[in-house]
Amino acid sequence: MRILIVDDEQLALSSLQRLLRRRGYRDVQTCEHAPVAVALIKEKNFDLVLLDLLMPEMDGLQVLEAVKAYAPRTEFIMLTAVDDVSTVVKALRLGAYDYLVKPVDHERLVLVLEHAFERLGLLAGQAGGSSGKKVELSVAFERILTRCPRVKEILAFAQTMAQSGNPVLITGESGTGKELLARAIHEAGPCPEGPYVAVNVASVSESLFESQFFGHVQGAFTGATRDYPGFFEQADGGTLFLDEIGELPLSLQAKFLRVLEEKRVNRLGDPKQIAVDVRIVSATNVDLEEACQLKRFRLDLLYRIKAIHLHLPPLRERDGDIPLLADHFFRAACLRHNKDLRGFGEGALEFLQAQEYPGNIRELAQRVENGVLLADGPHVLFAGEEGRGGARQSFARALRTLKEDADLHTAYVLSQTHGDRKRAAEILGVSVRQVQRKLVEMKKEPRWASLLNDI
């Protein structure tokens, strides 16, 4: 996000520049002379300009009038020492987004900036979707495959907001691609060369939370044989991605909030504070606002991590994306397993598009992967498309995700591999021993015995 501050007072320039950089806005330029500012705005693509109203060579209104036509996407915020209604109205008519009265309240300034950036993102999203105009996405966002206009709008908005460096909260069902979007935000942000550290919050035990996030020094506790930089230090100068942030225990949220506010950490066993400059991107499939109402999540922490909110729709609501993603997963699976297949068989894509996908994109990828591995001809087919009666048809009616019904899925894979334990283990993503143990357990149940006795 590129910001220009125009003011004839050097002290005001340096003060505002320091403030914005402390708040995460790194690309901030300053200019003392109005004519020079006019040339800069016409030449460069600034996202936002803070423009002083009273300057000797040209006043702020003259600058705004001279450049707005050349920078239609740039948002202008006027800074004025006199709260004059007629001047404010004129500025707004010329295209200013807002105005602030000097001395500028820092919190109000940051809030106005965030709202201006949200507006830029929304305009970018509308240009990418409903208006028909094409928004050029960076390489990072182009990796997110979609034909869905709604998702394209989200990506355009995300790309614009990514440049601000502000905290981002990504919500959506499990398997919708939240982590892929988080990495794209990092790569399109102000510090793409910085580290990207991804942490599954649910996997960090409460007893190890402080050690893992804040770090420790040698001897801080039994087993601390060396100094360890925590996740915040590891992500310094880059992005810390917190997956499943909704699983953060309530007892630890205050400590986490303190670090976000102070931007400093204390390693366990070390009284010295360490400054960290980290952009926080969080993701969850939990309704955090409801969690706040139930006193399971701190409202002040939610506000801190939700400066920018992105919601990814489930796969079933993404028009045109199932065939596109299925083809991508098909090609990747063929390459990975060294299989020379021609494509999907008759009715295969219709079968895929008819599913509900509670596991979303992750589930689609798994279905296509299994189809490629099980294919014994030139095309990928799915249960229920070919043959009548027998186990194949019953499996088609009852097939669910592995998580929903592990026994049924295991039985299906074993029947399709004709009892080949090694191949079944490869498809299921488990060890051969686990498949054998599961098979012994299932043969004890009458509903599976008839199907699995010969295996």
Image (cartoon, rainbow, N blue to C red):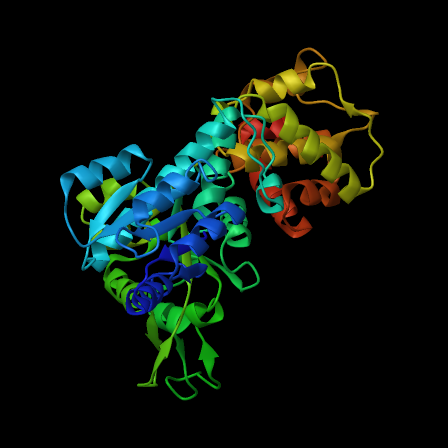
Name which residue lies at 29% across and 57% down: 249
Q: Which of 123 and 76 is in front in this view?
A: 76
Left or right side of 382 for 282: left
Q: Is residue 31 visible?
A: yes
Q: Residue furthest bottom?
A: 219
Q: In this view, does 289 lie to the left or right of 406?
A: left
Q: Where is residue 9 in the image (x, y as percent from the top left)?
A: 30, 65
Res 453 visible: no
Q: Residue 216 appears at what percent x and percent y?
A: 40, 80
Q: Which residue is drawn at 46% across and 43% down?
A: 160
Query: Depth check: 144 or 46 in front?
Result: 46
Q: In this view, does 418 lie above or below 384?
A: below
> Which quadrant, please, contains the C terminus?
top right
* Residue extending furthest toward the top: 388
Residue 106 quadrant: bottom left
199 is higher (above) or lower (below) than 454: below
- Residue 19 pos. (x, y %): 31, 64
Residue at 38% x, 50% y is 49
Q: Which residue is drawn at 38% across and 73% down?
A: 214
* Side of 258 relative to 35 (left or right): left
